[in-house]
Image (cartoon, helix red, strand yellow):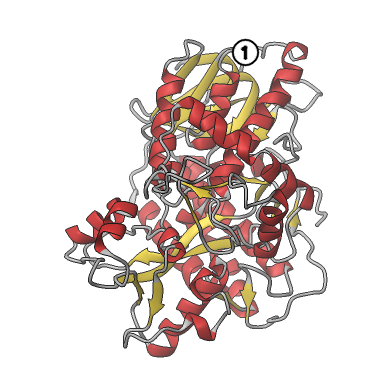
Amino acid sequence: MSNYSHDVLIIGSGAAGLSAALHLGKLGTVAILSKAELNEGSTFYAQGGIAAVLDSKDSIESHVDDTLKAGAGLCNHEAVRFTVEHSKAAIEWLIAQGVAFSKSPNPNSDFEYHLTREGGHSHRRIIHSADATGKAVSTTLANCVKQLPNVELFEGYNAVDLITSDKLGQQEQRCVGAYALNLATQQVETFAARFVILATGGASKVYLYTSNPDVASGDGIAMAWRAGCSVANLEFNQFHPTCLYHPDAPSFLISEALRGEGAVLRRPDGSRFMLEVDERAELAPRDIVARAIDHEMKKLGAECVYLDISHQPAEFITSHFPNIYQKCKDLNIDITQQPIPVVPAAHYTCGGIRVDLSSRTELPGLYAVGEVACTGLHGANRMASNSLLECLVFAKSAAEDIEQQFDQVAATAPLPTWDDSRVTDSDEQIVITHNWHELRQVMWNYVGIVRSDKRLQRAKRRIQLLQQEIHEYYANFRVTNDLLELRNLVVVADLMIDCALQRRESRGLHYTLDHPESDREGVDTVLSHRGDS
C-alpha cells in the first residue's frame, strides 16, 4: 500500500479544487484526488455561466440585493457581500488563466464580453462561454494545473475518510490527511497533509432524478460529519426546473439561460402558466419555477411540460445554445421549431459543511470550498450562476488563509495504514444495488420538491434501516466505489431529513404542506455532534 505526504491535499477536481491548487501550487506540494477523470464533475457540465458585476450599468448593491431576495431571508449578508465584491476579480483571474468567454456582438459595448441574464437577476451579469461555460472553465484550469511541477494529480481515487490527529495519539484535534481507495488497484492508500481542502461537490445523487454526474454523492459532507464537523441547511435541495425529458436519453440540463433569452414554459396544450404564478414569469427564482412545473405535472397527470424558444430566430438559437441545440437534434427535437420536453431534477445542494469566510471548518486544518460547503451565500435558494462564482472566491480565500499559516504548521507525522485484515470480499453485491435504488427512491418520493411531516417521518424510518444494513456491510466487507458512495449518501440523506424535520415552516426550496407559511425571521438549521441547533 502506498503512503503519500504533501503540504496540501485537495479532494475534488472541479472549479473549487482546481482554483485552490492554482493559488497554492507555488507555495508547496499539492495533491489533487479526483474520483474519476479530472474533468468529470459538476463544473464541467455547467452550462449557463458565472454571475459577476462587470457592466457599468450594474452594481454590487444590485447583485447583493438579488441574491438576498433569491435566498428567501436566509442568506448570510456578510458572505453575500464578500462574494459579490470579489466577483470581478474572480472573472479577471479566469480570463488571465485563458478561459475563452463569449465576446459581445455589439462593437459599441463598454464591455468586450457578452453578458446574459438568468432567473432572479435584475441585470445582465452572466458571463459565459456559449452554453458550455463549465467545460471552458474546467478544461482551462485543468490544463493550467498540469503545468505546475508541485501539483500531483491522482485520478481514479475515491476518498474513504479523513484522518484526524487523535489517531496519532495527539491531544490537539486536527485534520492530517485522508484514506483513499485507488480504483485501479482496489487498494486503500494513505495521504498525509498539513492542510486538507474538501472540494467534492454536492449530494444530488441522493435523488432518483438528477442533472448531476455520477460523482455527486455527498462524499465530503459525509466525511466531514464523521470527523466531527457541523453541517447546516441541508433541507434546501435545489431542483433545476428544466432538465430534458426523453426516454432514450440520460438527464441533460437545459440551461436557465434559455429563459433568460426569452424561452417560455408551456403546458402540453401549448398554454403558458408561469404568468399565473409569479409576475417575473419564467425569470422567477428556481424554487418557484420548479414548484410550478411540479404542480402542473401533478394537476394534469403530465409526464413533462415544455420549454419553448422557437419564436427566436434560428441563427440566434444555434449560435447562443449550440450544445443544447445539437443534443436535442440528436434526439429528433429541433428547438428552432419545436418546444423541449422538460422536468425538474435534483441539481444543487445549498447546505453543507459550515465554514467561515476563509473556508475554514470547525476542524483545524480542514477547509471546504464550493458546493460541499455552506458559506451562507445561497440561503434557502441558490440564485442562478452564483455557484461557480462561490467556488472561485472561496478557493482563493482558503488559499490565502493557508498561506498565512503555512510556516506555522509542521509536517504531518507518518500516518497509520489502512487495516483491512478483518474483512473479506463481498459475495452479495446485489445488496448494494437494492439499497442504492431504495435510498434514491425514498428521497425522491418523500423528501422532494413538496414535503409533509408524514412523508419526512416515513423517509426517516426507511433511511435508518438502510443505515444499519449499510454499516453492517461496510464493517464486514472490503470497500468498493459503490459501497463508499452508498455509505456517504445514506449519511447525507439522514442529515437532510433531520434538517427538514427541524424546519417548521416553508422557505425557499423547502416547501411543506403542513407548514406552508414562512416564519418572520429566517434561522439556519444547524446539526452538530454537540447536539445544539
**Residue at x-position 77% and y-position 20%:** 170
- 25 and 171: which is toward the camera: 25
Residue 437 figure quarter? bottom left
Q: Residue furthest front?
A: 108
Residue 321 shown left or right of residue 182 in the figure: left
Residue 67, percent across and down?
66, 57
The location of residue 35, given as percent across then percent down, is 42, 35
Is 508 placed left or right of 43 in the picture?
A: right
Where the N terminus falls, by quadrant? top left
Identified by mark 1, the residue type is Leu
The residue located at (52%, 20%) in the rendering is 31
- Does the image show residue 416? no
Is 183 situated left or right of 517 in this image? left
| Residue drawn at x 61%, y 72% as measured from the top left | 456
Decide which of 319, 50 is in the foreground and name it.
319
In-front residue for pair 374/196: 374
- Element type where label 1 sits in the image: loop
Q: Quadrant of the C terminus?
A: bottom right
Q: Is residue 438 above or below residue 402?
A: below
- Tally of numbered tags: 1
x, y percentage for residue 408?
Answer: 78, 13
Q: Please determine whether, in this image, residue 163 is positioned above or below residue 312.
A: above
Q: 317 and 417: which one is in front?
A: 317
User: Do we see residue 474 in this rendering?
Assistant: yes
Q: Position of residue 295 (x, y in %)?
A: 48, 82
The residue at which mark 1 appears reads as 27
Residue 142 quadrant: top left
Q: Is residue 252 above or below residue 397?
A: below
Determine crowd level at label 1: few under 14, some 14-19, many 20+ residues with C-alpha closer than 10 A.
some
Quadrant of the rendered structure where residue 390 is?
top right
